[in-house]
Amino acid sequence: MPAVSIVMPVYFEESGRLLRAIQSVLDQAVDLELHLVADDGLDYSTLLSDARIRHHRTGGVGRGPSAARNLGLSQCRGEWVAFLDSDDYFSAHKLERLIPLARQHGLALDNHQVVFSDGSAAPASMVAADTPSGLQDLDFCLAINNPLWPVFDRRCIGPARFLEDLRFSEDSLFNLSVIAQNNGHAGFLNEALHHYVVRPDSLSRRGPVGDVAEQSYLRILQALNSAPLPQETRRTLCDFYAQRIATNRAFVQWAGQAGNERLSFQTFVIQNEQHSSALAG
C-alpha cells in the first residue's frame, strides 16, 4: 500500500509542462501513487511508463477540475493525500518534508513560489521569510491570499469533496473547509516547496477580470451558509470570501490602467502586500 496518494487532474495540458509535473511527483523520496485523471477524453498512459501512475478518465470532456479531483480522491489508497495541478510542480523532498508535520497536526502546508510562464519568479514567495514554521491557525491560512496545497491525513478529509459546479477557487473552498474541520489548525513549513505557475491564458489570471471569479465567490457564500461548520467559523469564511470579491473588483480597476494589462492577479496581490508592509513599517 503506498504511503502517499497524489491526485493530478489533466485537461489538454501541454506535454512538456505535464511531464515536468509528473516527474516532480515521481522524484519524491517517498512510497507513492499518482492518480492522473484525464478530463479531456485523452489517453495519457503512453506518455510516461511508471507502475506508480494510475490512469483515470472523468468520462467526459471539460467536466471540470473538481470532478476530476473527486474521482482521483475516491481512488486514493495512501495514508496521506496531496493534490497537484498539471502545470505546477513540486520541489524535491516536498512530501518527505511535510509528512512529519502532517502527522503531528493532521495536515501540513508549505510556502510556495509563484513562477511565470517565461520561467521568471515573483519577487517574493507568498509567505514572508521570517514567518516561523509550526502550528498555524485558520486566520493564518486565510491571510496567505493565494491557493494552498496541503498534505492531508486522508482521515482528516473524511467526506469532504470539491464542489463540482465551481470552476474557480474550488480548491480554496475545499482546503479551507478541511482546515476548518481540523479545529482550524494546520502545520506550516516555511520553505517554498511548491511552484505555482501563472500563465497568461490561465483562469487564475483571467477569471478575476470577468464574472467567473465573482460568480464563483457568490456560489461559495451560498454553499457556506449550509455547510456543517461552527457558526463562528462559517462567519469567518464568509467574511473572507466577501473580501475576495472586493479584492477582485479592485484588480479589475487596476488591470485596466495603462501598463498593467499583462500583469497577473498574483502580481497585484504581491504588490499590495509589499505596499501595506512599507506603510506599516
Image (cartoon, rainbow, N blue to C red):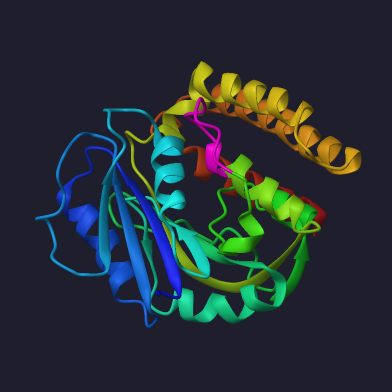
Q: Is residue 65 above or below residue 55?
A: above
Q: Which residues are magenta?
A: 161-171
Residue toward you, 194 or 100: 100
Q: Is residue 137 above or below residue 61?
A: below
Residue 207: percent from left, percent from top: 47, 27
Q: Is residue 211 above or below residue 104?
A: above
- Left or right: residue 215 versus residue 199 is right
Residue 259 in the image, given as x and y percentages of width and height: 43, 31
Given residues 84 and 256, the one toward you in this image is: 84
Q: Residue 167 lies in magenta, yes or no?
A: yes
Locate residue 267, reporting x and y percent.
51, 44
Q: Measuring 81% from the left and 41% from the top, which residue is drawn there?
A: 229
> Is residue 263 in view from this perspective?
no
Give the position of the N terminus as an image quadrant.
bottom left
The quadrant of the rendering that contains the C terminus is: bottom right
For residue 14, side relative to residue 262 (left or right):
left
In the foreground, 218 or 73? 73
Q: Quadrant of residue 105?
A: bottom right
